[in-house]
Amino acid sequence: MEHLTMGAAAGKERRGEQATLSGLQAAVIGGDGRELEVLKGLLAAGAAVRACGCPPAAAEVMGRPQCRTLAEAIAGSDVIIAPVPVIAPDGSLYAPQWPEPLFLDATALTEAKPGALLLIGTSTPQLKALAQERGLRIQEYGDDDELMILRAPTIAEGAIGLTIANTEVSIHDAQALVVGFGRIGFTLTRLLLNMGAHVRVAARNPVQRARAWELGARPLPLAELATAVADCDMVFNTVPALVLTRAVLEQMQRDVFVLDIASAPGGTDFEAARELGIKAMLGRGLGSRAPRTAGRSQWQGLHKLILAALPSLRRGERHG
């Protein structure tokens, strides 16, 4: 195992980070290649780390095997880091390379440290209630402004990659519609325009529509969505509410490609899309397309959140 330890040390030296989290115990649970960068960042900052549900390469990063269960990884940890993609409808964490589903439930939190900080992209009512019962503090970071903007280019590139793989037309000269013009919608619109697409942007906010016009897109109110989709080759939804309803989908060409990149369950009536013969996908985990880049951005945001909570975490250590 010597070469594994050397690998972790090399990562620390390469990143050149100060040991700002020395003495802290952290658990990284679930995730994909992005979480490998989070592990590297934690180690470089001086934290002791356990992992469960990460890709196999996590063992090389840490210099030891991953824990077999979430409970083992979480026990006694000051900070617990869960992935950005939301918990699946069956209650499982996003852990695409782990052999079985992982559930962040009462069993997993049996030996959770009271006062520990649980960082998760998006929580659920059940998890919030459980965390309160166990005395944990939950902080959702999936909607953090800085972190989302840092992640936006990777997510937009992932959306383009899925579109290329699932269409028979080029993006150049295609009729594209972006629904919603927040942080991801802005970056995706700019990328599509740079690739030569004819882009319309549907947004409720008139300021967002003005910004879309300034970029070179054709803005329209969200209320006009049903008439805007008729000639689209590709439609991208970023609104986490049901906007691509059956009535809207019925106005689309049957060879259109619909990619929903809003938080699960998305804003598309997927059942209606199937019945209508429209190819519609929920783009989950798009940030994994460039895990090294996205993971470093993710760690940058997480590091700041942990540093902000550090005084209370240190007090918890003294009183524990």
Image (tube, grey):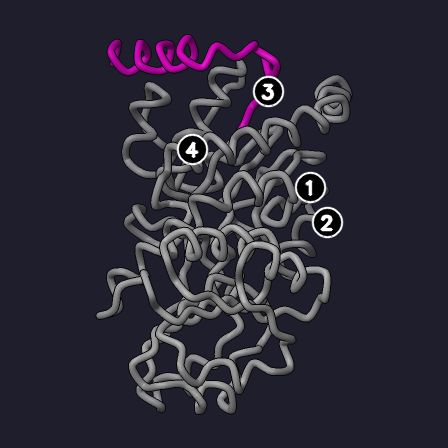
171 left or right of 247?
A: left
Give the residue at mark 1. 136
User: Which residue is disc 2 drawn over?
Assistant: 132
* Circles 1 and 4: CB atoms closer than 8 Å: no
Q: Is residue 55 above or below residue 240?
A: above
Identify the residue shown where x is 32% and y is 12%.
5
Question: Given the image, on which type of amino acid does mark 4 rest?
Answer: Ala
Q: How many marks?
A: 4
The earlier-in-sequence mark between 1 and 4 is 4
Q: Which residue is mark 4?
A: 51
Inter-mark Cα distance, 3 to 4:
14 Å
Compute the Cα span from label 1 to label 4.
19 Å
Q: Are marks 1 and 2 in contact (CB under 8 Å)?
A: yes
Residue type, mark 3 in image: Leu
Residue 82 horizontal side relative to residue 135, left or right: left
Task: Report helix, strand or loop for mark 4.
Answer: strand
Question: Which residue corresponds to the image point at 52% horizontal and 12% vertical from the top-left?
Answer: 17
Dot 3 or dot 1: first in sequence order is 3
Of the image marks 4 and 2, the number of the one nearer the N terminus: 4
Look at mark 3 in the image and give the residue it sits on.
24
Distance from the alpha carbon under mark 2 to that under mark 3: 22 Å
Q: Amino acid at mark 2?
A: Gln
Magenta residues span: 1-26
> Mark 2 vs mark 3: which is more N-terminal?
3
Residue sitting at 60 percent across and 31 percent down? 79
